[in-house]
Amino acid sequence: MYEDKTLVCKDCGNEFVFTAGEQEFYAEKGFQNEPTRCKDCRVARKEAIKASREMHTAVCANCGGEAKVPFKPKNDRPIYCSECFAQMKESEEA
């Protein structure tokens, strides 16, 4: 049903292939628009957004260590450092 399509990246202008498998994935997820950037430009854009994100420092509610978060911490919810957060997530999945 789907066939590979060659598209042009809106950032770098290079051609890239939108594979049949990717098209099927997009359809399953309900995405209506085709990708407009090649993989390299998508990765570069995500990295640029990450780098520009302001990080805030807080005290971990579990271990008391430093926690860096991409949002301004409020006193109404506990903040966890990445290690404690990962441990809590693991214990929830078990």
Image (cartoon, rainbow, N blue to C red):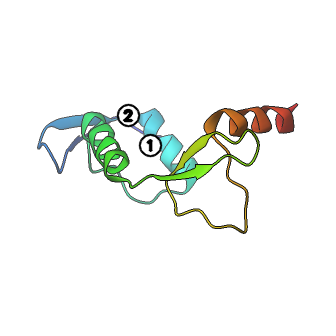
SS of the residue at dot 2? loop
Q: Which mark is residue 23?
A: 1
Q: Which residue is mark 2?
A: 19
Which residue: 19% across, 45% down?
Answer: 9
For the C terminus, the quadrant is: top right
Residue 53 percent coordinates (x, y) = 38, 53
Name the quadrant containing residue 8. top left
Position of 24 relative to 21 (above/below): below
- Check disc 1 and report its element: helix, strand or loop: helix
**Toward the viewer: 40 or 6?**
40
The amino acid on which the numbered mark 1 sits, given as a three-letter code, is: Gln
Estimate how packed mark 2 is, as few (under 14), some (14 to 19) or many (20 or more) residues with alpha carbons within 10 Å: some
**Horizontally, is 67 left or right of 9 in the view?**
right
Residue that protrudes farthest toward the left in the picture: 13
Q: Are marks 1 and 2 in contact (CB under 8 Å)?
A: yes
Q: Nearer the viewer, residue 7 or 13?
A: 13
* Amino acid residing under circle 2: Thr
x and y percentages locating residue 15 in the rendered image: 17, 37
C-alpha gap between disc 1 and disc 2 = 6 Å
Residue lying at the far right of the rendered structure: 94
Q: Residue furthest front?
A: 64
Question: Who's the residue at 44% across and 43% down the image?
Answer: 23
- Residue at image coords 32%, 45%: 51
Residue 32 position in % (x across, y down): 44, 60
Percent across and percent down for residue 46 are 35, 45
Drawn side of residue 57 relative to residue 65, left or right: left
**Residue drawn at 52 percent across, 60 percent down:** 71
The front one of 37 and 1 is: 37
Q: Is residue 50 above or below residue 78?
A: above
